[in-house]
Each structure stands twice: as structure tokens, then as C-alpha cells.
């Protein structure tokens, strides 16, 4: 009886050629194997070792100075209990006034930036005019400007010896002009709205670029006016971007120092200005550290809110 050849033992025969035997299949050696597409790890070096350098740099540059501030707030130089400096600062009128001023300036600037930023973003995105793309690009560049630069520009225009007062005195022949509001809380508020409005416009323009224009055309064909289209179609799509931009502006206004300093508003004391005054002018480092810890705690809480809102908005 003829033996039947195992089809796995040889390759298919080709006319005029001898069949080529297949190479025997070898089972993989026992032991762990690297995942497909992954580079083999360095032998003898645990993976956690590679995370040590960035952790050490982060601890030395950021965490260590922060720990020193917290320690200084709990161990005042003149002795006393751990929380005596906190009790003294919280009981002071200067701290309560600075906290109130900081909160209302930050909230007022945020509301102003939301209103102005939404209106300007609507014009740039939906009202065609020459140079709209250049204006949109300029907003991206404006985000890199330092805050004191905007304050100096406002001083050149509305300062005591600025252009507006100069024109007023030249035309009317009087000794002094009427514009002196920059050294008041309203001047600080104007400067913050001017500087932080692009931080609201940027996410709004990104949201408007993803809006389906067919919805606007359908609403317009059904007889809806511009105000109704903005309220019923555009505004619901812009709410996540408004929330993300507003949260960011609130955090940045809370910690703003340069605008308040360069406006020369002596009667406007915010938490950062109070830290500067306690540390530099009064040499009360324990009180300065207490105010700094409070400012940091509020900022971290608001930043956590910004991250949550930004994640939901896709920012």
C-alpha cells in the first residue's frame, strides 16, 4: 500500500523543480515577551528610576519654595503659636479690604471680558469685513504681551499728562484735564478688561469656527432676526467656551500684580499687593506668607474649576 505524504511536510511542487521541504516550526521559548511594537526596556534599570529626575527638578523649583512659604507662615520670627500669624492677619482690616477688593475686581473684570469678548468674537466670526483674518491672528499675538504694556498704553492716553488731558487743556485753555480715573479702582478694572478680553475671544473663535453655518441659514430662512439667531443658535454653542475663558480670566485677575502696580492706584490694594507691602515695605514676612498661602489656596481652587470646565468644553 502506498504511503500518503503529509501535505505539511513539503511545499507545493512546481513543474520541473523538486519540492522544497518546509522549515520545521519551533515553539517560542518560555518566558515573558515584549509587547508588539514596544522597545525592550533597559536591562537592570527599573522604570521608576527614569521618573526621578523630573520629580526632583519639580520638587526643588516649585514645591520647596512653596513649602518654605507655608513653613514661614506657621513659624513667625517673633515667636508664638503656629496659627498666631493667621489669626492676626484674618483679624486685620487691611486683609479683609484687600480680599474684598481682589474678589470684586476679578469678578467685575471677568464679567466685562465675557461681554466684550463675546461681542467682538461675533463680529470677527460672522460679520465679513476686510482684515478679519489679520485681526484674528493679532489676538493670538496679543496673548503673549505683558500686562504692564497695556497699562502703559492706557497711561499714555488717559494719564494725568496723557494725550486726552493734553488735548483737553490745549483746546479749552485750562490748567488740568478731567481724566484721572486710572488711579482709581475703575482704572484698574478698565486695564484688566482691556488686557484679558482676548483670553475669552480665543476659545470663542475656536468654537465659532466649528459651528455649522447651515443652522444659521435655516434659522434666517425661517424668519429669525440676528438677535434671535444669536440667542437661540450661537449662544448655546458658545456657552462651554465662555465658561472656560471666564474661568481662566477669573484665575488670572485674582493674581494680577503688574496692572495694579503700574496704574499707580494707591488706594487699590489686592492680595498680591498686600503680599508686596507686607514683605517689602513692612518686612513682616510671616504676615506676607499668610496672605500668600490664602492667595494660593484660592487660586488652586479656581484653577481646579477651570480644568473641570475646560475639560467639559473640550479646551
Image (cartoon, rainbow, N blue to C red):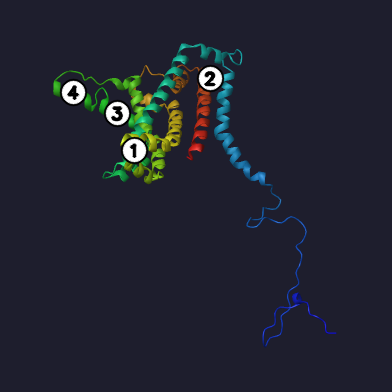
Mark positioned earlier in the residue sequence (1 or 3): 1
- Say which label, 1 or 4, has the lower sequence index: 1
Secondary structure of the residue carrying tag 2 is helix
Residue 34 in the figure: left or right of residue 166: right
The location of residue 153, given as percent across then percent down, is 30, 31
Answer above or below: position of 290 versus 136. Answer: above
- Looking at the image, which is closer to me, 241 or 101? 241
Mark 2 surroundings within 10 Å by alpha-carbon count, few (fewer than 14), some (14 through 19), many (20 or more): many
Image point (73%, 74%), residue name: 23
Tell me if label 1 and label 4 are in contact, CB under 8 Å.
no
Mark yes or no: residue 143 visible. no
Residue for point 51% across, 17% down:
287
| Residue carrying label 4 | 168
- Label 3 sits on a secondary structure element that is helix
Contact (Cβ within 8 Å) of mark 4 with mark 2: no
- Inspect this view and state whether residue 65 appears: yes
Q: Earlier in the sequence, mark 1 or mark 2?
A: 1
Measuring 31% from the left and 22% from the top, which residue is drawn there? 182
Q: Are marks 1 and 3 in contact (CB under 8 Å)?
A: no
According to the image, label 2 marks what residue?
290
Task: Classify mark 3: residues with Cα within 10 Å, few (<14), some (14-19) or many (20+).
Answer: some
Q: Residues within 10 Å of mark 4 (few under 14, many from 20)?
A: some
Question: Which of disc 4 and disc 3 is earlier in sequence?
Answer: 3
Disc 4/disc 2 C-alpha distance (Å) = 46 Å
Q: Which residue bears the numbered disc 3?
A: 154
Q: Circle 1 sits on which residue? A: 122
* Outermost residue, right side: 1
Quarter of the view holding residue 109: top left
Q: Secondary structure at mark 1?
A: helix
Frontmost of labels 1 and 4 is 1
The count of marks equals 4
Amino acid at each position: 500500500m502506498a504511503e500518503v505524504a503529509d501535505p505539511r511536510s513539503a511545499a507545493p511542487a512546481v513543474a520541473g523543480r523538486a519540492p522544497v521541504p518546509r522549515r520545521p516550526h519551533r515553539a517560542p521559548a518560555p518566558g515573558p515577551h515584549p509587547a508588539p511594537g514596544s522597545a525592550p526596556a533597559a536591562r537592570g534599570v527599573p522604570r521608576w528610576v527614569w521618573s526621578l529626575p523630573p520629580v526632583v527638578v519639580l520638587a526643588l523649583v516649585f514645591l520647596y519654595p512653596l513649602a518654605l512659604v507655608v513653613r514661614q507662615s506657621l513659624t513667625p520670627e517673633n515667636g508664638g503659636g503656629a496659627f498666631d500669624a493667621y489669626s492676626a492677619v484674618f483679624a486685620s482690616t487691611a486683609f479683609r479690604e484687600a480680599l474684598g477688593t481682589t474678589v470684586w475686581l476679578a469678578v467685575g473684570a471677568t464679567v466685562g471680558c465675557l461681554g466684550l469678548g463675546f461681542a467682538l468674537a461675533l463680529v470677527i466670526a460672522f460679520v465679513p469685513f476686510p482684515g478679519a483674518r489679520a485681526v484674528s491672528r493679532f489676538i493670538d499675538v496679543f496673548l503673549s504681551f505683558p500686562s504692564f504694556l497695556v497699562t502703559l498704553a492706557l497711561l499714555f492716553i488717559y494719564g494725568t499728562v496723557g494725550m486726552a488731558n493734553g488735548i483737553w487743556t490745549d483746546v479749552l485753555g485750562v490748567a488740568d484735564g478731567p481724566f484721572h480715573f486710572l488711579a482709581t479702582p475703575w482704572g484698574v478694572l478698565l486695564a484688566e478688561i482691556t488686557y484679558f478680553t482676548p483670553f475669552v475671544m480665543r476659545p470663542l473663535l475656536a468654537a465659532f469656527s466649528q459651528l455649522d453655518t447651515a443652522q444659521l441659514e435655516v434659522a434666517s430662512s425661517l424668519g429669525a432676526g440676528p438677535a434671535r439667531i444669536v440667542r437661540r443658535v450661537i449662544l448655546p454653542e458658545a456657552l462651554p467656551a465662555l465658561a472656560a475663558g471666564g474661568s481662566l480670566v477669573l484665575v488670572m485677575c485674582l493674581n494680577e500684580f503688574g496692572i495694579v502696580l503700574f496704574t499707580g492706584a494707591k488706594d487699590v490694594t489686592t492680595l498680591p499687593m498686600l503680599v508686596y507691602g507686607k514683605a517689602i515695605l513692612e518686612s513682616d514676612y510671616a504676615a506676607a506668607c499668610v496672605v500668600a498661602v490664602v492667595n494660593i489656596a484660592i487660586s488652586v481652587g479656581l484653577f481646579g474649576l477651570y480644568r473641570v470646565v475646560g475639560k467639559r468644553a473640550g479646551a
